[in-house]
Amino acid sequence: MLFISCQSQPEKTKISGTIKLKPSVDFPALKKGVDCVSFFPDGDKIVTGGRDNLVRIWDLKDKKEIATLSGHKKAVLTVAVSPDGKTVASGSSDKTIKLWDVEEKKCIATLKGHLFDVFSIAFSPDGKYLASGAGDDFVRIWSLKTKRTKKILRGHIYAVHAVAFSPDGSLFASGCYDDTIRLWDGKTFKFLTVLFEHKDAAWTLDFSYDNTLLASGQENCNISIFDMKTRRMITSFPGNQKEIQVVRFSPDKNKLFSSGEDGFVYLWDINNKKVICRFPANSGLLESMDLSENGKLIATASISGKIRVWEVEKLWK
């Protein structure tokens, strides 16, 4: 995975409210770094991918690994779980995307078409499509029925590092190193607009639960929030002290989680542009983070190989 230092951040947020939080699940460290993590819809399992080229499924109740899926030839950079929880998708530096049957624990398809590393994938809420962003500047929309490319979305001029569907499926967003976020119709994938007020590379994207806001974490460590009705930026503020890897809205859309290179998970008050609290999740770089659909748990994955799960509902409520 490519890392870019924060050179253009105008200021640092004054950090207060550091708390000690004990993980509810702390898996033994893997030998190689873990690049990505995603919750299953029921919140009882997570899937991870890493630099050992493997996809792993973990049971949070029994606190153990329940599946090891091999097939990628290089590091697994991104993972996602279908809305029904029956399929896992993984994107890799080997330029492919693999679909895995969770029950059978086997690969059911390999999607080929990207020319460079696959950085980000997302299932559509209706489970019909998978979107992928890669280093070849394109977004591909894959039909999960035919296992073929349905549409190629063009317009970005550098690597596409972030893709996201709104929860209701009406919108689709792609974020790129060309300093833009492009919005598309989530059903037809027709281009809608570019969010021109975005001034830096979009490393991560997330829609609010009610579909009204879009958050981006940027190369310069800033966090920006966009109103999806007006398609305008409504606020932007300095985020983590180092590179932001992931942003996730809590069920309260005024509160946003972020994680990054400094090893902390932050909770932000968007309206006041202030840190509500933060907790150390790893002694080094956090590669990935995800929030369960009910907002109760956060899973973190790190370059040190540590995978942890945290109870966070009381923080944002």
Image (cartoon, rainbow, N blue to C red):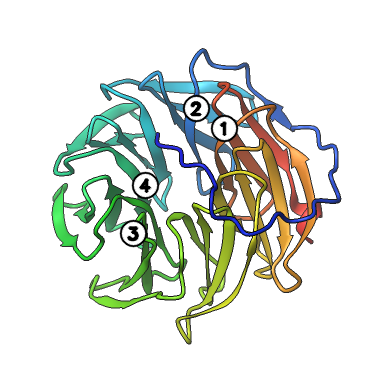
Q: Secondary structure at mark 3?
A: loop
Of 221 and 310, nearer the camera is: 221
Residue corresponding to mark 3: 178
Residue corresponding to mark 2: 34
Judge from the rendering whether residue 293 lies leftward or rightward of residue 268; answer left or right.
left
Q: Amino acid at mark 1?
A: Ala
Are dots 1 and 2 in contact, CB under 8 Å? yes
Number of the label disc, if any, that sits on residue 301: 1
Nearer-N-terminus badge (4/1) = 4
Number of the label disc, if any, that sits on residue 120: 4
Instruction: Give the Cα separation between the discs numbered 3 and 2.
Output: 27 Å
Of 39 and 21, nearer the camera is: 21
Number of the label disc, if any, that sits on residue 266: none
Query: Badge 3, how many Cα within 10 Å: few under 14, some, many 20+?
Result: some
Give the x, y percent position of residue 215. 54, 65
Give the x, y percent position of residue 89. 34, 40
Residue at the image point whose x is 27% and y is 58% from the top: 128
Q: Secondary structure at mark 4?
A: strand
Judge from the rendering whether residue 316 lies leftward or rightward of residue 245; answer left or right.
right
Instruction: Give the Cα separation between the discs numbered 4 and 1.
Output: 16 Å
Judge from the rendering whether residue 229 lies leftward or rightward of residue 116; answer left or right.
right
